Image (cartoon, rainbow, N blue to C red):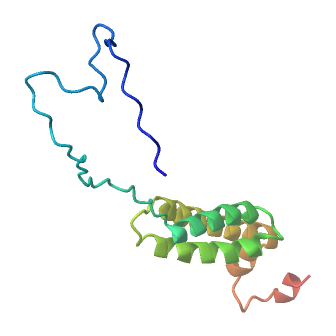
Amino acid sequence: MPPQPYAPPPQGYAPPQGYAPPPYAPPPQGYAPQPYAPPTYVPVAVPVPQEQGSNGLGVAGLVLGIIALVFAFIPCLNVLSLIMGGIGLLLSFFGLFARRKGMAFAGLLLCMAALAVTATVNDMVFGFGDRRSKPANSADWATDLE
């Protein structure tokens, strides 16, 4: 059952000064009653914010580059740095073809730095540079083994 409308105000009721008569009062004299028109709703196109896409390959390359650079300074772990730096280098390279290139470029630089540090640390620790500088047919090859 629908709710009952409000009862009209008692006779002799006057609205306070400065206020219009209530909507249920009869229209003032001289005006014809207006037909009720339902409110019109105009559909409004509200722009939906698009989610900003991220460069997954670039982020992965950046993370691998950071980890590889940290591991590159540790002699026993820099083999892992070599692997992670190589994978990160590939991921960052392919991430450069995406729309957002910043992280991919940073990952590319970090991976190249990690590979360079890995090669330098391996050369300093294991002395690969000393062996390459001597000719292969050196007469003192037996002393190199000691």
Horizontal and vertical percent position of residue 99: 39, 66
Give whichever of 43, 144 is nearer the camera.
43
The image position of residue 23, as x and y in percent, is: 29, 28
Give the percent coordinates (x, y) of residue 40.
22, 49
The part of the image, by quadrant, that contains residue 27 is: top left
Residue shown at 40%/29% (left/top)? Answer: 7
Q: How many marks?
A: 0
Q: Nearer the viewer, residue 130 or 120?
A: 120
The residue positioned 37% from the left and 21% from the top of the image is: 9
Compared to residue 46, the image places residue 104 above or below, namely below
Q: Please give left or right for residue 23 compared with residue 37 in the image.
A: right
The residue lying toward the viewer, choosing from 134 and 17, is 17
Tell me the quarter of the picture where residue 139 sits: bottom right
- The image quadrant of residue 121 is bottom right
Q: Is residue 29 above or below residue 4?
A: above
Q: Which residue, as the protein is rendered here, is positioned at the far top?
A: 17
Identify the residue at the far right of this view.
146
Q: Please determine whether, in this image, residue 64 is positioned above or below residue 144.
A: above
Q: Is residue 2 left or right of residue 139?
A: left
* Residue located at (69% from left, 78% from top): 83
Q: Residue furthest left?
A: 30
Q: Nearer the viewer, residue 74 or 51?
A: 51
Give percent across and percent down for residue 35: 16, 42
Residue visible at 41% across and 37% down in the picture:
5
Extreme-front residue of the structure: 11
Image side of residue 134 versus residue 59, left or right: right
Quadrant, the C terminus: bottom right
* Residue 103 position (above or below residue 136): above
